[in-house]
Image: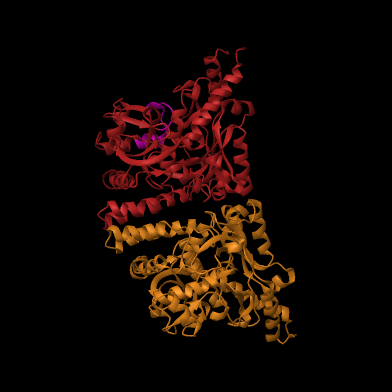
Chain colours: A orange, B red
Amino acid sequence: MPRPTVAALIDTANAEALRRILAGDPWLIDVVAARDVLPRLGERRILHAGPPIEWARMCGPMRGAVAGIAVFEGWARDLAEAEHLAETGAFAFEPNHHHDCVGPMTGMTTPSQMLLVVENRAFGNRAYCAINEGLGKVMRFGGNDAEVLDRIRWLTAEFGPALGAALRQLGGIALKPLIARGLTMGDEMHQRNVGCSSLLLRQLAPAMARTSPGGEALARALAFIAGNDQFHLNVAMAMGKAIMDPVRGIEGSTVVTAMCRNGTDFGIHVSATGDRWFTAPVEMPQGLYFPGFSAADANPDMGDSAIVETVGLGGFAMAAAPAVIGFVGAGNASDALAITRLMREITLAENPEWAIPALDQQGVPTAIDIRLVVETGIAPTINTGIAHRKPGVGQVGAGVVKAPLGCFTAALEAVAETMGVA
Amino acid sequence: MPRPTVAALIDTANAEALRRILAGDPWLIDVVAARDVLPRLGERRILHAGPPIEWARMCGPMRGAVAGIAVFEGWARDLAEAEHLAETGAFAFEPNHHHDCVGPMTGMTTPSQMLLVVENRAFGNRAYCAINEGLGKVMRFGGNDAEVLDRIRWLTAEFGPALGAALRQLGGIALKPLIARGLTMGDEMHQRNVGCSSLLLRQLAPAMARTSPGGEALARALAFIAGNDQFHLNVAMAMGKAIMDPVRGIEGSTVVTAMCRNGTDFGIHVSATGDRWFTAPVEMPQGLYFPGFSAADANPDMGDSAIVETVGLGGFAMAAAPAVIGFVGAGNASDALAITRLMREITLAENPEWAIPALDQQGVPTAIDIRLVVETGIAPTINTGIAHRKPGVGQVGAGVVKAPLGCFTAALEAVAETMGVA
């Protein structure tokens, strides 16, 4: 029997990668304290979005978030002391992705925070993400004042436990059908989660009424979910991580398993090369700014949220969300259809369970193949929020950003090396 | 000064009609017992959907609903006695539209039922509609057994008062922005209300937690809303009625103020001719059937719900709901765009506050002009549920139906007569 060609080996490996993505069965099952599920997350250790980075190279909003979360954890008395400690190397920084976690924008994960738990029941793995704080001046966009920290304290002490109790009472919430439904409601699950956030509330509200003492605490918890169109984003992110982690480490597979950014570098993981990072400088989002802000205020691209695009949503599902394309300043309804069709050119398949009504039920483009990205020169399109470049301010807009092609060419060379093709 | 032409008089009158439609400011404000707000609705008086009809001409599901609601009200011991009483003329039947009401499908309104209250704050008028019962075997589709009556008893005794208390605590819910948002979430507000039902729950859940004793009763109420994608339909209907009632009676206006069906006749109201009915035999919906049912089981078109199309939603907003067009068996996503464009040809304007993202924010077609219907021969397209033709069964499918052109030609002749043009 002749030895199979490298191309054939890659095709076989990618078919397995695709099979694992499509077989994923993610459920939102609980809310837990980070310290209880991440044993390697000790004192003064801070997980952040994107590939590895040290304090010296961190952008403004990530520094702001680091200072804020250190105060929240009681590792510093105030922001100034926290910054001093960070500069002197008192904190260990590691990517969320090294700890089964993801985090939006700055993506701070520390021991005391409450994390959403998504379990991939087809493979048994779990992934974690902090609870979405809402819009505006929030820690994920670099906010760090008393209001920001008080909200995280409330999420930790009151809201997170209540949400966890409701999820346990429900036996979890199946996310694959939730996403399928959200795609019929104008969501792409990155910059628009109004449908999925509403659908989550529909499942959660009766369970919260059953598991809560009721009254004002229950009303506050329900109002928090109801008041945040992006509540589901962090669920979608943990789901993306839970779906993609079983796809890691398939010999010869050129499928992207993670895309993320730390505000300085963009990084990707590819199946064949496991946990090896391929990085390039992040790009600036092109987008629209809230009143009073402009591109001069914008921080470069940031966050683990591109895991949403990695599973075929976000920019890849733009056709499902004609209302979002104006919000991110990327054109009109026909442009939305065109972007999804373009992303199909760098993916292996469509996901039949996640269909887009406006494309006559065509599934979302699924399984980014670095070979196709390099061959076509088409970069993955990511829908993203835009943070102010200075610490402490928060979100200033939303837009679209391209994944830098350098990550993909470097990864392709590395995969080729693993297969003995130099 | 020369006397204005008839055409110019009509144009002026229609401009005023359009102004009143666009100025409407509907709010869902309360839930009340029908007997407390409809003083002319006495004992053994039953309001029904569509234009006037007597028992002898009523279709199967409407007869089934009449028998069921008579038992619910305690006017008969059982369905057989109720039917006998109906045959012998013991009940007075009148259209909902004669009492500031609307009702979906059979549209039963009787003194003990709890009604949603929508106030048009721009004009001070109110409109009423019973609470949506859910899907399947329900009274609006002719269901009338113990399960159906028990649900209405619960709506009356427990759910309705709880919903009313929450609405009063909120100071009402503004419906115009809710609809605007729903149009970005794939709703057309007739056969698809999943977005608006979810958005209602988001506003209601915290208020219900604040105004309820909590626990299982609250959980049951929240679960009822959360479990019914069509919960908002009846809100949309009362809203349509509240918007259109101030448009009645404008001398010379050829704008349609109501479209409705009783399962036997289709009827319309036109502004210039006030409360005069123009009727024609109803048509059969073309649609898709639930498993086990076919067109042979279908009752002809029924319900006051075409008030939703009368304000520019439902079939007129099909472009906003690419997911619904498959459900009603009317084609694919591009057909959905085409239907909205077609309805624009029989309407005076677009509603800028109700924009459709898939049509690059074009507003829904608004103010049906009977002149345009007659000139073009384009009948209003209505999205509708399909009832079983026999009493007691319930919903068997969903589809699309045309308003019969005969109503419009008759109405146009009548308006011409009022203007001295024979």
Residue drawn at (30%, 64%), measured in percent from left and top?
A: A211
Q: Which residues are magenta?
A: B49-65
Horizontally, residue A111 falls left or right of residue B309, namely: left
Horizontally, residue A58 falls left or right of residue A168, namely: right
Comparing B154 with A266, the one in front is A266
Residue drawn at (56%, 23%), measured in percent from left and top?
A: B12
Q: Is residue B42 visible?
A: yes
**Quarter that holds the N terminus of chain A:** bottom right
Q: Position of residue B127 (x, y in %)?
A: 38, 34
Q: Position of residue B147 (x, y in %)?
A: 31, 47
B327 versus A46 height, above or below: above
Residue at the bottom extreme, as displayed: A420
Comparing B315 with B65, the one in front is B315
Horizontally, residue B372 falls left or right of residue A125, namely: right
- Location of residue A387 (image quadrant): bottom right
Residue A134 highlighted magenta (yes or no): no
**Quarter that holds the C terminus of chain A:** bottom right
- Location of residue B167 (image quadrant): top left
